[in-house]
Amino acid sequence: MPVGTQATLKGVLPRDIEIELDAKIILSNTYHLFLRPGHETIRALGGLHKFMAWPRAILTDSGGFQVFSLNSLTKISEDGVVFRSHLNGDPHLFTPESTVDVQLALGSDIMMVLDECLSYPSDAKDARRAMERTARWARRCVDHWRANDPEGRHACFPIVQGAMDPELRRESAARTIELDAPGYAIGGLSVGEPRDLSLEMVDVTAPFLPKDKPRYVMGVGLPHELPEYVARGVDMMDCVLPSRSARHGLLFTSAGRVLIKQSRYKDDAAPVDSECPCYTCRTFSRAYLRHLYLANEILYATLATMHNVRFYLDIMRRIRQSILLGAFPQHLADLRRQQQGQALPS
């Protein structure tokens, strides 16, 4: 899922996300939209789909990750999270129930429960406390969602936590599936831990989640990691990495990474990736993109983001096709060999 935090994928028209990139679903952020322009404003204007002119699916997170990333501005209790706006310092309270209400006002297709996410490394006692609180909050969220959306027009996904403790992860998964939700998320990853540890935590968690419902790993990952998560039973992922990296000059390609500011691309007439069918690669050279980047032109961010997001989405499209053909194990083996080749010193 491309990430459109502020109801926009930075620098890219919704028309191009739908038609050129063919994204089926995007993610927006409850915390940021709650603060600006406000969920009631968005509700009055027809909901988030109409507000941002996006006709396809939208997933919104609950703001739980901002509890982690902005922890200097927050205070957590059993009731919820009191936080101060990073915009003006005004105090606000997020409860499990209020985060559902905000997401219902936004009109999200998939809503996430409020959870407590810890940084890495975390104390064992803190990890258990956060896991148990997340489980209690999840039940409150799901109960409130069912009471206020009896027709099930929106989905609500609870989140498995447990830091980097396999036993806590298994316990959290067991408590989470008791809620019989439409789908389940694995949270608390990409919080500073080694990449191998992220995969290990998915390894120990995913088998405990129902096979007939979506499994969503939040906040991952690098291009070569996507098939590894799928191999572990993951259906959904999101990450700001493709768009954020693009804006900072890092482009992902089938032959490895391209740092577009490097002088080697000054006169390079080749596309960013000769195997990529995106608008950027069909139309522009590396030399042109380097020029735009060094000149700080807005167009650079648009073209680079379109390429990186398309690159990610195409990885997933090829994975889906290989699954349909019964060829995913071979596809995964080929990708692993390719990654090993790119990792070898030149």
Image: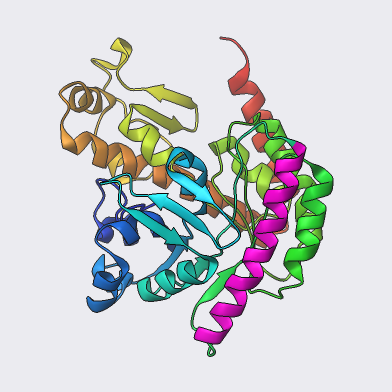
Residue 276 appears anywhere in the view: no
Viewer-side residue, 115 vs 84: 84
Q: Is residue 74 left or right of residue 143?
A: left
The stretch of residues the image draws in magenta is: 124-148
Residue 10 appears anywhere in the view: yes
Q: Identify the residue shown where x is 55% and y is 86%.
A: 147
Q: Identify the residue shown where x is 32% and y is 22%.
A: 260
Please tell me whether residue 70 is drawn above or below residue 172 in the rendered image. above
| Image colouring | rainbow
Q: Residue furthest bottom?
A: 151
x then y, percent, for residue 225: 62, 38
Task: Tell whether position 34 is magenta.
Answer: no
Please tell me whether residue 301 is drawn above or below residue 219 in the rendered image. above
Q: Identify the residue shown where x is 50% and y is 85%.
A: 148
x then y, percent, for residue 266: 24, 15
Please tell me whether residue 126 is drawn above or below residue 169 in the rendered image. above
The quarter of the image holding the C terminus is top right
